[in-house]
Image (tube, helix red, strand yellow):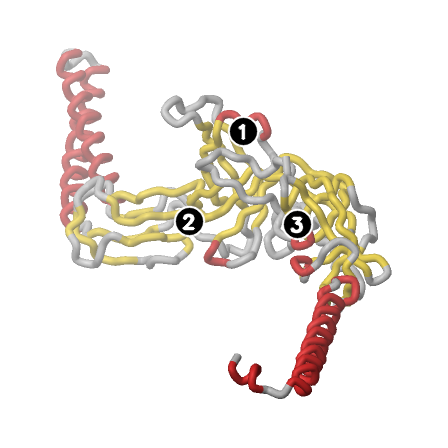
Amino acid sequence: MTGVKNMPKARIPLLILLIMLAGAAILQIGCGRSSHSETTGNGDDVTVPVEVATVTSGDIASYWTGTATLEAEKETEVVAKVSGVVKRLLVEEGDYVTAGQMLAKLDDEKIAVQMNQAKANLDKLKSDYDRAQELFDESLVSAQEFQRAKYEYESQKAAYDLSALDLEYTAIRSPISGVVAERLIKVGNMVIANSPVFRVTDPDPLLAVLHVPERQVGRLMDGQRAKITVDALGEREFAGRVDRISPVVDPSTGTIKVTVEVNDASKSLKPGMFARINIVHNVHAGALLAPRDAIIEEDDESAVFVVSDSTAYRRVVKTGYVNSVHIEVLDGLALGDTVVTTGKGSLKDSSRVDMVNAGPAPEVAEAGIDPDEGGEAMDAGAGIEASADTAQASSDPAGQ
């Protein structure tokens, strides 16, 4: 202030003028930047790059989804019917065998000697019986003596037959046709009668046993189609059908046993594999299908952005069945509409867009028979998975 007081009075108006000019310049620059910012921030003047797809029509199905471990319809433990030392092994794990085929041979030397001894005694008693028959016919022996000779002969014949059967049992045979899943013995092992020696499995067909909550069973019935996937084989699908439904409810769990039969002509599936089973219980044919990625879920409603003349318009839709690729649209779209699938998070109603992938609509998978699987025709739709633990069926329409 001392400097201003000491300044000549003629210079004070000039200083004030300079300060006013500087303030006006700063204000002008600020207004210009604000105007530029507003123009840039206006979505109507910005074009957003997006990917789009076309609304199509096709079949979509609803499923009840569960998980199970695959098991063979026919599986047995082959047991040794007599005791003995393993002399030969004729099959290995993985070999296919037919019913009655010999799998292993036990040492039969002792049993063969016992059978020969029984045969000799049988021949002697047969001679005694024939002689007693002749004497009895001539009334030279009593009926009691004849009956005793007959009894001894028949008793020895049974002993001989038993020895012959034991000799036959030294050849261990498979009771069913199938694949040798496990070998439990080695050459030289002492095998005890009735102990398991092999496990044979027939993998055709395979079964998946599900335990379905009783309130869901009303949607299921014998013969319904199913599709099966296993984590070990990626996205590959196998056809099956509901083979049988238990007539009783397990009171401890409140579930009903449902058995699904899987026919795998390619022999790719193995017993013990963890499988995901989708049982088809309803199909909507000719449904209007939009890409699942196009749906926006917010505020308890479903919406999409429909592109027309390079402008995206937000439209509320009503949805139905949903699968991993498509969602059924019950209301709000028409066949051939173009909807945004990627980039919708940057849009608002009436935003200008640049369709970077504009082209033909993606094909909708059609139902058909996979010749590699040898199974039944499957619908294009795959049900949205629901946990069997929570007993939620995958058929509930989305958004309901």
The answer, for residue 369, to whether it is visible in the render is no
Q: Which mark is residue 216?
A: 1
Give the mark, 1 or 3, whose residue is nearer the N terminus.
Answer: 1
Local crowd at mark 2 within 10 Å, few (<14), some, or many (≥20)?
some
Q: Viewer-nearest of labels 2 and 3? A: 3
Q: Is residue 311 left or right of residue 13?
A: right
Tell me which amino acid carries mark 1.
Gln
Camera-side mark, 2 or 1: 1
Residue that appears at 31% across and 58% down: 90
According to the image, label 3 marks what residue?
296
Q: Is residue 49 above or below residue 244?
A: below
| Mark 1: few/some/many CA within 10 Å (<14, 14-19, 20+) | some
Depth check, mark 1 against mark 3: the one in front is 3
Whichever of labels 2 and 3 marks the residue nearer the N terminus, that label is 2
Q: How many marks?
A: 3
Tell which of 312 and 339 is nearer to you: 312
* Residue type (three-letter) at the residue carrying disc 3: Ile
What's the mark number on residue 271? 2
**In the image, 131: left or right of 7?**
left
Counting from the top left corner in percent of width and height, residue 302 is at 68, 44
Residue 378 is marked as: none
In this view of the protein, which residue sits in the foreground, 107 or 334? 334
